Image: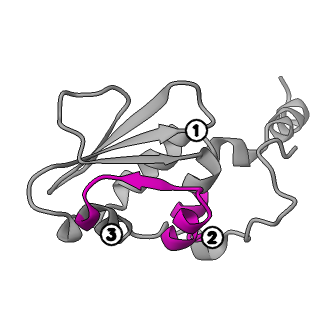
Amino acid sequence: MDSDHRAQSSQRVPHVQRDLDPAYVLWATVKLVDVERLPSGTTVVRVVLRDEAASSYWLILRAPHSELCTKGVGYVEDLVCETDPQTLVDLHLERLSYRQARQTKRLDLRGPTALTRAFPTWFRTSPFAPYLPARTATSSLSAG
């Protein structure tokens, strides 16, 4: 394939699609966990995606490094986070606050009150957030 065809081919699949891949966004989020703010020990958060049939991920949050798992690993779940891929992106890029996400029902956290209140403080914002354009009302998952 010559360079002109590669350029046209790459334009058919918007870059934003990779950024909406929940595994990618959650992996990037786990890399930004502030382990100094986590409760002691291991905290397990199951992330349930509303838009993805039977799709869950597990955040294993602990010092010195947190992990993302695609299968339950036998830990007791401390929190359940129910949301959608776009909300994950908007939170990660600080286009939406955790408070706004909860108030608008885009994010549901279930678990002990102390953990649900602390949850938003465990993650740093993406270092790319200041350099990316704000999402507009006309943006959508099927942008092309």
Q: Can you name the residue that lies furthest to the bottom here?
A: 130
- Residue kind at label 2, given as amino acid type: Arg
**Which mark is first along the chain, 3 or 1?**
1
Q: Is residue 120 left or right of residue 103?
A: left
- Residue kind at label 1, given as amino acid type: Arg
> What is the x, y in percent for residue 134?
73, 71
Residue 103: image tag: none
Q: Which residues are magenta?
A: 89-114
- Residue kind at label 3, given as amino acid type: Arg
User: Which secondary structure, mark 2?
Assistant: loop
Q: CA distance from mark 2 to mark 3?
A: 19 Å
**Which mark is first along the chain, 3 or 2?**
2
Residue 106 painted magenta: yes
Q: Residue drawn at (33%, 62%), measured in percent from left and top?
A: 116
Q: Nearer the viewer, mark 2 or mark 3?
A: 3
Label 2 sits on residue: 95
Label 1 sits on residue: 50
Label 3 sits on residue: 117
- Establish if 84 lies above or below 97: above
Query: Is 18 or 57 nearer to us in this picture?
Result: 57
Mark 2 surroundings within 10 Å by alpha-carbon count, few (fewer than 14), some (14 through 19), many (20 or more) = some
User: Which secondary structure, mark 1?
Assistant: loop
Query: Is 70 or 117 nearer to us in this picture?
Result: 117
Q: Quadrant of residue 33?
A: bottom left
